[in-house]
Image: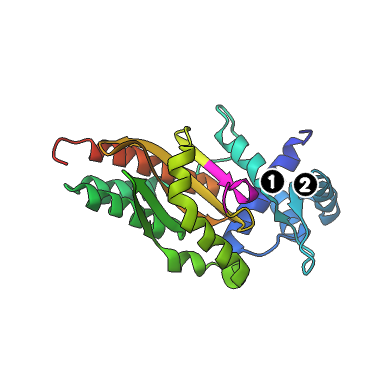
Amino acid sequence: MNISERQEKILAQIIEEYAETASPVGSVTMAKLFDVSPATIRAEMARLEALGLIAQPHTSAGRVPTDAGYRYYVNRMTEPDEGSFEKDTSESRGMHALEKRVSSQSRADAAIRGAVDSLVELTGNLGLATVGGQLYLSGISRLFMQPEFMDTNRVQAVAKLLDNLEPWLREAAPGEPLNIFIGHENPIGKNSEVSLIISKFISPFSDRSYIGVLGPTRQNYMRVTGLVRYAGQMLEEVLNREII
């Protein structure tokens, strides 16, 4: 995709601003951040919109990321040796809290629930794990407090996704250590406009166990993916201890 370095940085900033505010991002805000004129930003936004990476809601002059924009961002974020997106400094603090909570457990179910609950608290999303055919869920109320879910149709779409999540994971068995399904990429609940971020890990109960979060596409992907990946690593370590 033909996108300049400045356009890439603008896209990243729109995604990160939108994740924080849940409000469309305008050219004046971006112009101040990049120390250029609003007209310059509008021209760059027009290019990003033409590429399908951002869109303009009917009720706003600002722009929001599209699923394709999030996918571009996530792919660039996870490419080796890419310096475009800086590491979220709060991620390490979250990892420390998660490790402390999970590693102190001596029972498998307590460790799993601790990891899931930690992800809920750290991300504000719904936390989930499926281990040996058992599905752990936490944070449904936190998920539906997000502004995206004022629409009852979206709530119903998410409920459908959750109803089918465990059997789909069992059948599809996503094979990557970290799997990110954004918006319409979700194999179930395509219209729910949520992202499913899951880490695969090996446990004594199954070699395809998963832990992750389900939340709106409006995510701090850098931070959330790091925490989900780390949760999987911690559970794999703790669940394979001899004391379990």
Disc 1 crowd rating (10 Å Cα; few below 14, some 14-19, many 20+) is many
* In-image side of 169 versus 52 (left or right): left
**Residue 171 location in percent, x, y?**
46, 40
Which is nearer the eye, 120 or 36? 120
Q: What amino acid type is highlighted by mark number 1?
A: Gly
Which quarter of the rendered picture does the N terminus lie within? top right
Residue 84 visible, this orientation: no
Pick whichever of labels 2 and 1 is earlier in the sequence.
2
* In-image side of 224 versus 111 (left or right): right
Which is nearer the eye, 61 or 6? 61
The reply to whether callout 2 and callout 1 are in contact (CB within 8 Å) is: yes
**Residue at 57% of width from left, 68% of height from top?**
149
* In-image side of 117 versus 140 (left or right): left
**Residue 97 location in percent, x, y?**
31, 51
Q: Which residue is identified by label 2?
A: 52
Q: Which residue is identified by label 1?
A: 69
Q: Provide the secondary structure element on which disc 2 rests.
A: loop
Given the current orientation, which residue lies at the most extreme left position? 243
Q: Is residue 170 above or below residue 109?
A: above
**Residue 40 location in percent, x, y?**
84, 49
**Residue at 36% of width from left, 36% of height from top?**
201
**Residue at 48% of width from left, 57% of height from top?**
162
Which quarter of the rendered picture does the C terminus lie within? top left
**Residue at 31% of width from left, 37% of height from top?**
206
| Magenta residue span | 180-188
Residue 183 among those drawn in magenta:
yes
